[in-house]
Image: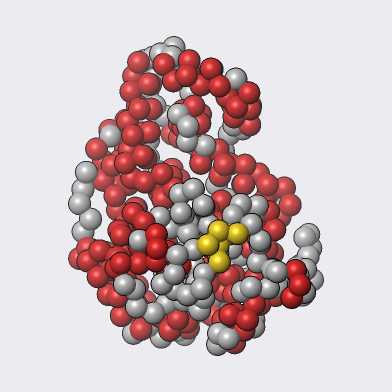
Amino acid sequence: MKTVNFSLLFGVLFLLSCSHQTRENQTKDVMREPASASPPPLRFESCSDGSGRNYLENQILSMAPEYYQKAHYGDWSSSIPMRCVQAAQRNYGAGFALCSGPSAAPKATKMKPCMSEAYTTLTYNAYQDVMDCFNLDSKDFFLQIMIESGFHVNAFNKKGKDSGITQFTGNGLQRIAANNLVERTRTILLQSSRPSCQRISSVVGSFDSGAFEVKNRCSVIALPRNPYRAMFFNYLHTMLDQISIEGIVDDIPEIKNVMNEKIKRNLVYLAYNRGLTGARRLLDGYVKSRKAVGHEIVSDDLVLVKNLTDVKRVLSSSSWKREKLKTSKKILNLSFAEYAVINDTPYLSDMVAADEYTKKILGDECGGL
């Protein structure tokens, strides 16, 4: 596998910061939120203090108003509608965390934060500012954040301690804390004239490399640094994953021969959730299983947009079939996503399900697979 070329990474970031200067006078193709968004319309919650769900509201209101009062459509070259983020927040039903401060350990709670206008606008701005600052297409990453956290600032996996809007693990934080990557990238952002980059660099703050420990995991949850800090870290992690995935693909000719940008992006999603070792193990196993039946892998085998509902239901109701399928050497027509589900990795199928859900209620405006 290729090692990460940090000089290349920072060269890309430097060129990116230069491009911020040249884009100032260019005409922007800005997608603006319609005055009446339907379906579904933007309906923000107003929670009473007695509900127990207002625990983030005062912290949000103590931030600079530019972060939560309105969306910065005029600053972005493109955007998804805010209702995409709101739909993801409404649909999310996993756990959350309370943080007494950035250096604290998260305390699990089932209480979802009040989805007020300030809360939804803050999370939306954090997502769009990072997308704009780093010249990313916001449609490409929507499903990833939707699945990871439902765009909730304090999403928390009690079992694995995955934390925040981008569900960072200890290993993930260690990775982006190495080689002073956070501070070096933040320095580049401080030199940018792009408003989205300025908002990021002004709020994320410095990052102590010890914050990847569980006892300090609120560093990627607690306001006011987050959700901007967590979204910024997600970009850094994705860049590293992208470089590593390219190295993995180069090492596997059967995958390299059918690779395209969409497949590569989906593998980066998988690596973020399962880790590089897990992604590599799945790819190697899939190639081995195809060789066993004499099947030459084609691009369509790696396409995710396939109905995996039946596969998941069968394996859920008849667990013995999973073990039988794992050891079977006679399955000729088997996609990579199906292989992943059989091998206890439902992430890709979850992404397909999320894609189907958002398209059903919002069409293609949020992006997708």
Q: Is residue 25 above or below residue 44?
A: below
Viewer-closest of 8 and 240: 240
The image quadrant of residue 236 is: bottom left
Tell me which residue sits at (43%, 14%) in the image.
Answer: 328
| Residue 209, quarter of the rendered image | bottom left
- Location of residue 12 in the rendering, given as x and y in whole percent from the top left corner: 29, 67
Provide residue 158's location: percent of width, then percent of height: 51, 52
Q: Which of the pair 283/63 is nearer the observer?
A: 63
Q: Is residue 197 visible?
A: no
On the image, the x and y values in percent for residue 151 come to: 58, 61
Residue sitting at 30 percent across and 67 percent down?
A: 210
Residue at the image point whose x is 68% and y is 47% from the top: 357
Choose top left, top right, bottom left or bottom right for residue 9.
bottom left
The residue positioned farthest toward the top in the image shown: 330
Residue 111 x/y as whole percent: 66, 61
Residue drawn where x is 51% and y is 73% of the image: 100
**Would you place residue 256 above or below residue 292 in this image?**
below
